Image (cartoon, rainbow, N blue to C red):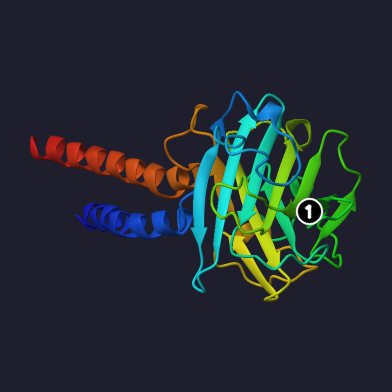
Amino acid sequence: MILKLFLIRSIIFSLILSPIFFLNVYAEDPILISISSGLDQINFDGKWTDSYEWKQSSYNHLTFADGTEIHLRSAHQGDFIYIQINAVSDMFIDKLADSALVCFDTKNDKTIIPQSDDYCFFTSLDGKKSFTYQGNHIPAINGYFTKIPNDKDFVAVGTASDQYDRYNRTPHASYEFKIPLNLLGRSDNYGFFISVFDAHTNNHYSWPYKIDNQSIISIPSPSQWGDIISPDKSLPEFNLSFLFVIIFPMVFAMQLLFKFSKSSFLLKQF
């Protein structure tokens, strides 16, 4: 009887805990990245070259408490991931000072200290060079990330928008990235982080929204990043950690309860 009561309480506790756990895992909805058939034709100049250029891509409208807006476009095609960050609220064109950063956790293991599977890509407004950073678990000036040589096919450009922009025809900061999959590896679920620095206001605007310890030289821990997933690939229905922590113990407890109840029933027959 005591064992039966314990098993019942365990199941009830798991049911109560599961929504809390689920909220922790999915505190922020993931970015959904789509497959495209036309982004290989993009002219990488940092902006909408025409009003149709980025139409075949996923769209996320990011808004912030101070009224700042960022329009995020993402897609994958062939051997590349394509990202456009359109900072429509940054209409003060601070060349070389305004900047954008895009990061991927290729294993999506969200480690506190960055590892070699974590990559970040940086460009500044009208900067002549863009940079690639890789996590290496060794303390560095920008938070455990070390600058590595750019892949020969990597492209990142930042510039001021023009009349072809779909969201704001007043010139503002805009950034485009072409990131090789031979560097990231192919996956339908990456850890993901973007950050835009507005030099005029001296503010960072990021996704996920609430990221601690941001600065111009420090990249936040992958443990704080969100997810970018490709729904056109096969995805597991649940996060694996959810299965291990909640579902499997519940199934095991229910099996034990069933066996215990069956044994009790058989004993009563004698």
Question: Does residue 104 show up?
Answer: yes
Question: Which quadrant holds the N terminus?
Answer: bottom left
* Label 1: which secondary element: strand
Percent coordinates x, y for residue 178 in the rendering: 74, 38
Q: Residue at x 64, y 51 (%)?
A: 85
Q: Is residue 226 found left or right of 92 in the rendered image?
A: left
Whether 220 is drawn above or below 188: the answer is below
- Between 70 and 76, the one lying in front of the other is 70
Res. 13 image quadrant: bottom left
**Residue drawn at (35%, 42%), measured in percent from left and top?**
252
Residue extending farthest front: 163
> Which residue is under mark 1?
122
Where's residue 205, x and y in %?
62, 65
Looking at the image, residue 154 sits to the left or right of residue 66; the answer is right
Which residue is situated farthest in the left direction here? 269
- Tell me which residue sits at (45%, 50%) in the image: 245
Q: Amino acid at mark 1?
A: Phe
